[in-house]
Image (cartoon, rainbow, N blue to C red):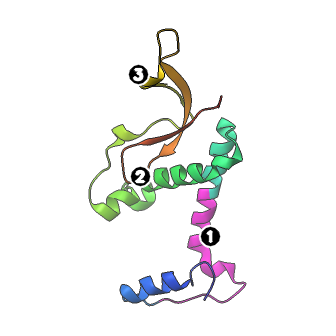
Amino acid sequence: MSGEYTSNKFYALFVLNRTIHQTLCTNTLEQNGIAKRKYKHIVENVCSFLLFIFVPNMFWDEVVLTAIGLINTISSSYTLCFSPFEKLYGYTLDYFFFRVFSYTYFILLPHIECNKLSSRSNIYIFLGYGEGKKRYHYFNPIT
């Protein structure tokens, strides 16, 4: 099996969860409307992020993860003012953790990398969030 939703691992997940998997007829995009609209929504967000901050295309994967993370944590009127995260887990995410995308930060260097005459921080641009832990991904535009 091959394809977007027909890989062996995907099929094994269906069997494990006792889910009935139904595929669509080929060349009938109107049958796959929800997935196509969501894909378009994600791609449009990623393109706007990349164009807004002039980040090299090599960081597209970080931008995709950041866009999906924001889409999943922002509430909408479509879901009765709940975010998909709230609907799934039953509690609100702490928004204090969020940072401004593409914002410039000065990150303090460890003491072992500094001497009396060197800079104690470097300039970084925020790209996204680490998976599973409260950490951030930055990129140094100079190096």
* Residue 42 picture location, percent across and down: 59, 57
Measure how far apart labels 3 and 2 are at the Cα level: 36 Å
Q: Secondary structure at mark 3?
A: helix
Q: Are marks 1 and 3 in contact (CB under 8 Å)?
A: no
Quadrant of residue 72 within the rendered picture: bottom left
Measure how far apart labels 1 and 3 are at the Cα level: 50 Å
Q: Is residue 28 magenta?
A: yes
Identify which amino acid the numbered label 3 is placed on.
His
Extent of the magenta region: 21-42
Q: Residue at x 53, y 54 (%)?
A: 65
Q: Residue 118 shows which numbered tag?
A: none
Label 3: how many Cα within 10 Å (few below 14, some 14–19, many 20+): few
Question: Nearest the camera: 110 or 126?
Answer: 110
Examine the rendered structure and indicate whether residue 130 appears above or below residue 90. Answer: above
Residue matched to label 3: 111
Quadrant of residue 86 within the rendered picture: bottom left
Q: Which of labels 3 and 2 is toward the front?
A: 3
* Residue 82 picture location, percent across and down: 36, 56
Residue matched to label 2: 73
Q: Is residue 105 visible?
A: yes
